[in-house]
Amino acid sequence: MTDHPSARAPALTWRLRVSRRARYAKLQIKPYGGLEVVIPTRFPRADVPFLVAKHADWARRQLDKQARLRQSIRPPQHLALAYDNSSTPVIYPNQSLAFNYDLFSESPLERIVIESDSQPQQIRELRAWIRQRARALLPQRLDEISRRTGLDFRRVTIRSQKTRWGSCSSRGHISLNDQLLFLPASTVDYLMIHELCHTHHLNHSHQFWQLVESRCPDYRSHEKLLSRSRNLVPDWFLMDLFS
């Protein structure tokens, strides 16, 4: 991927990404990556500058909005996770340990020590810590629910998915989003049951929902909660995820 100057607005630059999954060309703003143009494989690259020029006013407004948002977002002083009701102090460079002490933390001796002075890198370090915590907690819980429900799986991976909380492949490989740690444990449990049911029905057919209901009778309430749970993920986490 390379940066290209806009034909009509030299100050406006973008990154081009060719996607086999894209049905049409689109412009999107990446919080730490600026303007990105996504095109299908057959879209003429020569037409990209004209596409950008057509939407240049929109792009500039969005870039200005993202710049203001970046200035307002600060990495957290404590990393709070709803999944295990934990709050872990975060220590940044040149910051006193005493200043960051949390009397209410379940793990008062645990701290997240950030090495970088760069905000984007600080957020990446925090996300790496969350990924490590997710790998320690989520697979174990999935295994427990698998044994309890009688729904087997072959493998589990932890990822930072942009749109999905989880997924299941035809081979029984389950992928879980590390952002699930920002959700209550009961909601995460339902998501795991949902994905485990996909090991039997790789669709959302009537049979699939029957299986879900047999393992989680109040699944409808959990579905509603899950659909509204994106706002539980902090802005600072998403800023880096979509860059």
Image: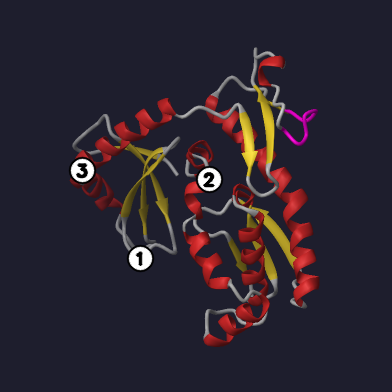
Query: Is residue 23 within the magenta segment?
Result: no
Pointer 2 residue = 233
- Amino acid, disc 2: Val
Quick check: 65 left or right of 90?
Answer: left
Q: Position of residue 172 (x, y in %)?
A: 70, 73
Q: Nearer the viewer, residue 186 or 205?
A: 186
Q: Position of residue 118 (x, y in %)?
A: 55, 23
Q: In the image, what residue occupies the spot 66% across and 27% down?
A: 90
Identify the mark nearer the N-term, 2 or 1: 1
Pointer 1 residue = 23
Q: Nearer the viewer, residue 139 or 209?
A: 209
Task: Mark 3: give few (<14), some (14-19) or many (20+) Cα within 10 Å.
Answer: some
In this picture, which residue range is highlighted in magenta?
105-111
Identify the mark nearer the N-term, 3 or 1: 1
- Amino acid, disc 3: Ala
Q: Callout 2: helix, strand or loop? A: loop
CB within 8 Å, label 3 to label 1: no
